[in-house]
Image (spheres, grey):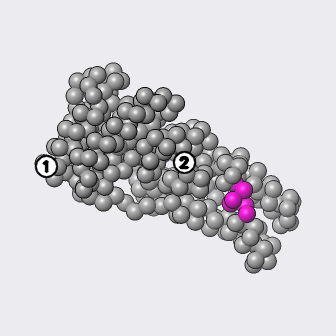
Amino acid sequence: MGIFSKLFGALKKTKDGLSEKLRMLFSKNKLGDEFYEELEEILISSDVSVTTAAEVVDRVKQQAMAERLKDGDYVTGLLRGVLTQMLQESEVEPPAYPCVIMLVGVNGVGKTTTVGKLAHYFLSQGKTVTVAAADTFRAAASEQLSIWADRAKVRIVKHEEGSDPSAVIFDAVSSAKAKKTDVVIVDTAGRLHVKENLMNELRKMDRVVTREYPEADFLKLLVLDATTGQNAVNQARVFDEAVELDGIVLTKLDGTAKGGFVFSLSQELSLPVIFAGTGEKMEDLEFFDSESFVEAIL
């Protein structure tokens, strides 16, 4: 089960809360309009958006009516199946090699830490890794990344503080091509998604990779703090419009009692969670598994 054996413990509060609400719902309501309205409210209380909650309930309702189901356990099974299918609709395959992974996001979500964890993940898959310190604005950002690179035992490409981040990416990509490195992981400066000049800088970095390394599988991943809740969907929408995101890395998934926004990301933005973190250790990050996630919260 890997990371999700840890997740079962980390999301116990969420699972217990949802299970208790569903148990109470089944005990007092027969299947009908009132039942489905309350089921929708339960999903919304777990940070599923109103739009996505309505879609989930509609799918469950249609299947339950078609099969003339009255049993609560069976309807819970239907709910589990619908939620899993919803995540799987946006799922992607693991990256092909060589690949460049550029991490973007707002301040404080754990991008630099995630670079170190991703480096460890790919090393454990037998791949060679270079990390690029393209956060050239935050004081000591490259030093922090150097510590993670040292822990993971991978190469780092960095410039002086205040340098052009696109120049860092150019050098990292050039080095990776020369050395036939499997994976380049780019750390970028945290930026508010409402600052257009900073989003333009991301677009420039995007163009450098696309131009200089067209043969690489290029993934732009938004790092989201799972405790952010529904605001995470708003962040994802703006970053996606700026750089056409390929997916999400969730951090601090062990610290949230509500993980429902993950379904909204998939349903409304077609953005899959690709990696998820459940702790502080280097190995506490794995490739996301939709079925295990749903199992952990229901």
| Badge 1 or badge 2: first in the primary sequence | 2
Lateral position of residue 143 relative to residue 61, left or right: left
Dominant SS type (magenta) = helix
Distance from label 1 to label 2 (Cα)? 40 Å
- Return the mark for residue 10: 2
Q: Amino acid at mark 2?
A: Ala
Residue 200 visible to an observer of this rendering: yes
Task: State whether residue 159 is above or below residue 257.
Answer: above
Identify the element where label 1 is drawn: helix
Lateral position of residue 254 relative to residue 44, left or right: left
Any magenta on residue 188?
Answer: no
Task: State whether residue 265 is above or below residue 255.
Answer: below
Q: Amino acid at mark 1?
A: Lys
**Image spot of residue 18 (x, y percent):** 69, 53
Task: Please state the extent of the stretch shown in magenta in the rendering.
Answer: 53-58
Asked whether 1 or 157 is in front, the reply is 157
Identify the element where label 2 is drawn: helix
Q: Residue at x 24, y 33 (%)?
A: 167
Q: Residue at x 45, y 51 (%)?
A: 247
Q: Residue at x 34, y 24 (%)?
A: 137
**Image spot of residue 166 (x, y percent):** 28, 34
**Image spot of residue 90 (x, y percent):** 51, 60
Give the number of the mark in front: 1 or 2: 1
Which quarter of the rendered picture does the C terminus lie within?
Answer: bottom right
- Return the mark for residue 5: none
**Picture quadrant where residue 28 is located:** bottom right
**Image spot of residue 10 (x, y percent):** 54, 48
**Picture quadrant where residue 126 is located:** bottom left
Residue 112 visible to an observer of this rendering: no
Lateral position of residue 250 relative to residue 141, left or right: right
Residue beneath disc 1: 179
Lateral position of residue 83 relative to residue 221, left or right: right
